Image: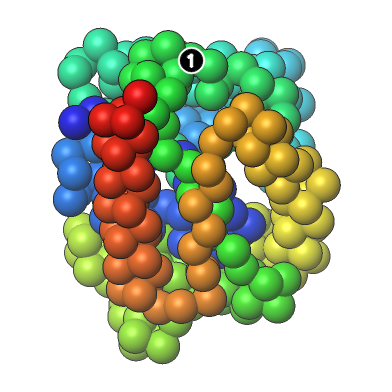
């Protein structure tokens, strides 16, 4: 079955890590907006004033222009669908504008019953702790959370490259701003999706990576059973 899985949650909730695990288990393609955005800025011409301006916004911890990001994401989603695979989004939609543009596309491509939406909940305090001290790998930017089991790691467990800090994006003030931005601009998506008829699958993000993963798998299985039951009774 081809799914479109959407992971919503504040900074540090482990969306990217869980998306990678789910992608590997179910053969999904992980579309990570943060990597797409970074790549666009990395390859941007210095003469491109729009991208230069948006890069400064991104570095400050604010969200980029929703219309621009949505265009990039919709293109990526359609490319995955055309390849015959399911997908998982870990950092989009981030605004109501993006949700209103992206969710209908997912419904059109995969069917509404196959769009699964998770909200990984995480407190402000834990978000600050994880983001202020987390690292990524130098080669592929795999996130390594600030959790006890990873404390002594010096290289990425996935590709062996050096672990580095993300600099400005994880400065304390930027981390605080990013959580505030999440509450103001991303959390309202949940009510929008509920009004659209979606079950928002709640997950406790305060747990270990393994326990969050187990909860996601169990609740995804429960959701699929409910969908099958509803279809059979229709």
Q: Nearer the viewer, residue 15 or 49?
A: 15
Q: Under tag 1, what secondary structure?
A: helix
Is residue 178 shown left or right of residue 22? right
Q: Quadrant of residue 45?
A: top right
What's the residue at 63%, 57% (across, down)?
10
Residue placed farthest to the front in the image?
Answer: 233
34 vs 124, nearest the viewer: 124
- Residue shown at the point (61%, 17%) measured from the top left: 101
66 w.r.t. 13: above or below: above
Q: Which residue is mark 1?
A: 105
Looking at the picture, tell me which residue is in the foreground, 61 or 71: 71
Looking at the figure, which quarter contains the N terminus? top left
Q: Residue at position x 19%, y 48% from top?
A: 24
* 119 sits left or right of 111 in the view: right
Left or right: residue 128 compared with residue 22: right
Q: Position of residue 128 (x, y in %)?
A: 67, 72
Residue 138 point in image, percent of width and height: 36, 56
Residue 38 visible within the image: no
* Residue 115 screen position, x and y as percent: 41, 32
Residue at the image point whose x is 30% and y is 61% from the top: 218
Could you say where residue 98 lies in the image, as x and y percent from the top left? 64, 25
At label 1, counting other C-alpha atoms closer than 10 Å, the crowd grade (few under 14, some 14-19, many 20 or more) is some
Question: Can you say whether 128 is above or below 93 in the image?
Answer: below
To which quarter of the image does residue 176 belong?
Answer: bottom right
Q: Is residue 150 toward the left or the right of residue 65 in the image?
A: left
Q: Quadrant of the C terminus?
A: top left
């Amino acid at each position: 079955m081809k799914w479109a899985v959407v992971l919503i949650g504040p900074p540090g909730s482990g969306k990217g890590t869980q998306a990678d695990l789910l992608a590997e288990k179910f053969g999904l393609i992980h579309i990570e907006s943060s990597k797409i955005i970074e790549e666009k800025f990395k390859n941007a011409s210095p003469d491109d004033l729009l991208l230069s301006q948006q890069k400064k916004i991104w570095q400050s911890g604010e969200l980029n222009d929703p219309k621009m990001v949505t265009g990039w994401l919709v293109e990526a989603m359609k490319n995955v669908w055309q390849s015959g695979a399911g997908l998982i989004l870990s950092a989009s939609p981030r605004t109501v504008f993006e949700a209103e543009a992206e969710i209908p596309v997912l419904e059109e491509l995969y069917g509404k019953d196959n769009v699964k939406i998770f909200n990984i909940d995480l407190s402000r305090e834990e978000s600050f702790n994880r983001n202020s001290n987390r690292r990524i790998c130098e080669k592929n930017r795999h996130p390594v959370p600030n959790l006890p089991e990873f404390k002594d790691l010096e290289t990425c467990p996935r590709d062996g490259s050096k672990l580095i800090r993300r600099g400005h994006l994880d400065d304390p003030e930027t981390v605080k701003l990013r959580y505030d931005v999440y509450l103001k601009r991303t959390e309202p998506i949940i009510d929008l999706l509920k009004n659209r008829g979606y079950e928002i699958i709640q997950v406790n993000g305060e747990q270990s990576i393994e326990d969050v993963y187990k909860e996601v798998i169990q609740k995804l299985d429960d959701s699929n059973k409910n969908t099958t039951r509803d279809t059979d009774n229709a």
